[in-house]
Image: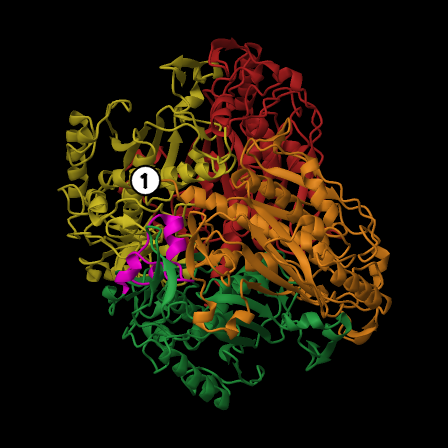
Chain colours: A green, B orange, C red, D yellow
Amino acid sequence: MASVFGTVFRISTWGESHGGGVGVVIDGCPPRLPLGEADIQPDLDRRRPGQSDIVTPRKEGDACKILSGTFRGLTLGTPISIMVPNTDARPEAYREMETHFRPSHADFTYQAKYGIRNWEGGGRSSARETIGRVAAAAVAKKILKTLFPQIEILAWVSRIHDIAAQADPATVSPAAIESNAVRCPDPAAAEAMVARIKKVRSEGNSVGGLIDAVVRGMPVGLGEPVFDRLEADLAKAMLSLPATKGFEVGSGFAGTLLTGAEHNDPFEIRGGRVHTKTNHSGGVQGGISNGEDLLFRVAFKPTATIAKEQATVTESGGESTLAARGRHDPCVLPRAVVMVEAMAALVLVDHALRQRAQDCLPR
Amino acid sequence: MASVFGTVFRISTWGESHGGGVGVVIDGCPPRLPLGEADIQPDLDRRRPGQSDIVTPRKEGDACKILSGTFRGLTLGTPISIMVPNTDARPEAYREMETHFRPSHADFTYQAKYGIRNWEGGGRSSARETIGRVAAAAVAKKILKTLFPQIEILAWVSRIHDIAAQADPATVSPAAIESNAVRCPDPAAAEAMVARIKKVRSEGNSVGGLIDAVVRGMPVGLGEPVFDRLEADLAKAMLSLPATKGFEVGSGFAGTLLTGAEHNDPFEIRGGRVHTKTNHSGGVQGGISNGEDLLFRVAFKPTATIAKEQATVTESGGESTLAARGRHDPCVLPRAVVMVEAMAALVLVDHALRQRAQDCLPR
Amino acid sequence: MASVFGTVFRISTWGESHGGGVGVVIDGCPPRLPLGEADIQPDLDRRRPGQSDIVTPRKEGDACKILSGTFRGLTLGTPISIMVPNTDARPEAYREMETHFRPSHADFTYQAKYGIRNWEGGGRSSARETIGRVAAAAVAKKILKTLFPQIEILAWVSRIHDIAAQADPATVSPAAIESNAVRCPDPAAAEAMVARIKKVRSEGNSVGGLIDAVVRGMPVGLGEPVFDRLEADLAKAMLSLPATKGFEVGSGFAGTLLTGAEHNDPFEIRGGRVHTKTNHSGGVQGGISNGEDLLFRVAFKPTATIAKEQATVTESGGESTLAARGRHDPCVLPRAVVMVEAMAALVLVDHALRQRAQDCLPR
Amino acid sequence: MASVFGTVFRISTWGESHGGGVGVVIDGCPPRLPLGEADIQPDLDRRRPGQSDIVTPRKEGDACKILSGTFRGLTLGTPISIMVPNTDARPEAYREMETHFRPSHADFTYQAKYGIRNWEGGGRSSARETIGRVAAAAVAKKILKTLFPQIEILAWVSRIHDIAAQADPATVSPAAIESNAVRCPDPAAAEAMVARIKKVRSEGNSVGGLIDAVVRGMPVGLGEPVFDRLEADLAKAMLSLPATKGFEVGSGFAGTLLTGAEHNDPFEIRGGRVHTKTNHSGGVQGGISNGEDLLFRVAFKPTATIAKEQATVTESGGESTLAARGRHDPCVLPRAVVMVEAMAALVLVDHALRQRAQDCLPR
């Protein structure tokens, strides 16, 4: 019951990296939304391997197919099943994983938990699993755009290893983000990042970093106290992505170095409505969006699967070493940008529909 | 539907800071667990106001009563209802909140979302709401102790403002944590923290900081890919606490500065079972606990309600100023330590029962 | 997790018949609904023991108290906690239940499932548990009335033992139903039913019967294919009431004796909108309400706890006999009428809010 | 969110009768269960059209494919995705449904609820949707057999129109049920039923009837008070099947004609454990299984889609007539037998896993 996300707009993802395919079933999608594969494919293409020379060269086309829930280009209100077949599996590259646990990967814990694992690939812990999320999120984004035409969800790489980028969340543009392979809107930093990624790959090593995100054009009132606060659901959504180690909203960890008088966001009237002068809150107060830009950041660790030889143990309990073969991303962040946006969209659409349900009496 | 937490061990909290009381209903508690108010009260006492000179002087006794679900000192397997009446409400201290939105508090967003709010206190966004969580967690801890006798959940203040403490998660003790009002196991740092809190309070200001947590004696195999990863549910749990701005597990944000070769935790055989040599993973890999210490950290912003005068707006849309009266914590962290432990216990017990449900076939 | 009902308007009931009390927490109630104890008490009074000479003479006042979720007479959108303390417990009447399992009661199954039970009363299986449902339903009915002013939910006793009543669902009135102790709108049948109930009680025996229900003024479009069909959720709701053995909607079991040509409800235009000429469907087609009167029926078995001596076994495994003492209803139906209405209201309000959530795009 | 069923063993079905296919995602399946398509296909074959001369002659092979969640013949504990492509769609047979609402079918209500519908077939309300349920239930049955080797879930046709069969739930066998096309274990009745079905089909008409079910070898202790009583979840499960109008458990509606003294099931010790002498309870008391045979019955209305001309209205609001073309079952019951068994298995496996989760402390 752990592959289901959302309460009203609810998705079930399925699929291993090596098997029949991966996919998602969306339950609770509003009816009459124009929807076709062409709405979904662009984000899948941004997510897929092989799109640049700094990601894994696997050649998966990741072409999606909508199997149900639409009729003549419109959603029916019934479950939407979307599937992407697996094509470029090379299980032989994983032969050693049958017996060897990759350090800091999910091999050992899956084996311990389930007493079995699909070692021909990353199984369910592979980033390939996120295809279902990205596909569902493409639908979510279309709904959000219909409900809140001003809304814009953007994520970008803000740091790779120790190379930090400069970007203003208020103005960063999709074009700037997509202008380079690393998805960093700061061209100078992007260039250094690409170089760093190529360098660590050449060394059989890997790097991590930070992804920043903003949602502009946010409606007021999304988020449900007390457990389903907007930032709580975002935190869960982000930490459910592979390789994540941290989440912060607004001022985040750095905000703990300010006093209350420095940190508080004074209210003012601007453009005829309530605004805050600053945005340390990151767009959410008391778990509910206040209409300011939603700001958050996600930390991704360096890829666990590396070509360097590492100490490990075998399934039978012996100590050994392992140097991973296979075609792995030396840095997951360029592709993870799409996943971060996707999870944000899934959280927001669910909260938008929930707010609509509860706020049903005349004001 | 947002005041319900957990899937198998499921709690519903209720109550505003000013009203009849606060409480929780626990659904799914195992039967035959010895349970009385005396099991719950100690953690409520650690959480309550007025316990030291660095927290709010409100005089709430927070005495709990079990209203259902037990019989002659044992749980029945039926819902356990626990209530704490409100006693020391002083709504007059909140008179200005009827018209003025406190900066960085939940006044504005509740009003915007619901079209109404209980302005006589913090309402549902008050830390008082966490009483239900702490009470439920006391039950959760008893279950965990029965299932995993070695388990130990500890949280402590690791930084207040810029005063950082030294503590080793492997050895930090409850006694050291409880030895001072700030709940910091490093005595020198604790002294400086207390002084800092008193200073900012005297200035009508507030501070935030960090809480670190460890779970020792962790079982292997808790956590459910893909959305309900252990760290994802912990992140949600922690970000659902008032005043939180960030969460990290294991190496967290700092881990992004390492390469994969540096960050990976090599496996070894120790004491007859699989261990990792290092613990950058923080005890969780692929969303599942690996048996190492579970390590995480939570960032708390400085308290929003301060005595200093701040710019704000009124409900009718005018600009104004506000200097909060009332009896507020200048720093929430000493009391939040108990809440962090509580949320961790609630996450762990739910995952323990879920694992038991799914892992039902013979190995 | 089994004492939670509903998905968007979600209730958690708690409490045993003998203990601190019984109650409910409502999560997801819309904000700004006028609500006070006076809105809830009337239905609790219709449900409570001691209201006439054909029900149990227990003297429980069942006075409810709203503990949270309202402010100055309006709902806040936060959880509403409602409690009714237990007052007239007489555990001594249950002394024999410590060792003897009452035939066809829940004593044996609770003991087998939980390894423990509260034998001082009916515990969680007592009809007293339904107080929380009836209280929550009073709130649900107020919401439904605001959303659909024409809606009217009515249930009545249509048969006691073999005494059947005549009543037209299209016109039956609350006044007619409440005009006698048995809640049967057919005065002649009601008189015979009262006599029968008194007779079986005098014999230490009990009877069951049927409750019919209608919802008039139904909106079109409530009910969610495929699992949460309106009739499926109603069936679950009704079978979750104590002593129920059957449920049918529209033509029900009798409809299976018709051919399709006889059973189908032809469509026609009437009063400017689509209607059916007949209503064998009972107001629901494909799991979704069609705007016709919602019609269903619930079967209640004779009360299990009777004064006559019966064969049974003891907890220690011996065969024995039992003649129940205590003050029990010789027939649950007069009071169950209120419970049937309550469960219908809870199902309908949840579906109304769910439909509002999903149907969010412009038509 | 209405196509998800179960809480711990949770399934999501998807698919319309005319579209890419139908399927199911199973979340929460225990790991290490032997599973292949060959375990699933037999029940799909029992469910599919074209298997005899009294059901629809549509030629769907309904060959299933497992797309995820297994590895070398064993379940992984991860989501199992099962798909059956649509093959024999003939949308031209449904042309008139674009404008005409079929009486007592879901056309009008889907259109009213969603503002759109897939009129090229029955869409989501088609019995074809149940393929996902039957496939998931095949997995559920394998789990149940592993946990409770004695368990046996059997359903059969007990009445068609007014032709009733004789069968003893204690001894009825799969072979007897499968010995004829109508799935009735009483050969004489079966013959008459087949004749009746052929007759009404030749008249362009249809019939309904009753399906009885028994679960033998039931474990004690399944079912969760108060809302998720075993009979409540069974009632919901059965009423979620297309064309159902009623459900009863044990003595059901007929039991309301008995007094308590007649209806109560006295306990006795038999074979070393607690049994009831009679089984009016139908194997469930207080919502929990007592180890006796679980007995229930489901009423199915006559098929709505018939060839006879009927009065109806068009989408544009005019009155008209309709004589359905297409290849429809004149009686759904022979195929519904499989669906009833499937839903029972899904309810039981979920309750078995839930009981395992909650009953985790030593007895």
Question: Image quarter for residue B149?
Answer: top right
Q: To which residue does mark 1 refer? A: D143
B357 lies above or below D148 = below
Q: Residue at x 84, y 55 (%)?
A: B53
Q: Chain of mark 1?
A: D
C297 lies above or below B262 = above
B52 lies above or below B247 = above
The span shown in magenta is A94-123
Left or right of B199 in this view: D210: left
- Residue D206 is a magenta residue: no
- Type of the residue with mark 1: Ile
Left or right of B1 in this view: A88: left
Q: Position of residue B309 (x, y in %)?
A: 84, 73
- Residue A103 is a magenta residue: yes
Q: Nearer the viewer, residue A307 or B32?
A: A307
Question: Image quarter for residue D291?
Answer: top left
Q: Position of residue C52 (x, y in %)?
A: 65, 23
Q: Secondary structure at mark 1?
A: helix
Q: Position of residue B140 (x, y in %)?
A: 59, 43
One can see residue C326 in this view: no
One can see residue C253 in this view: yes
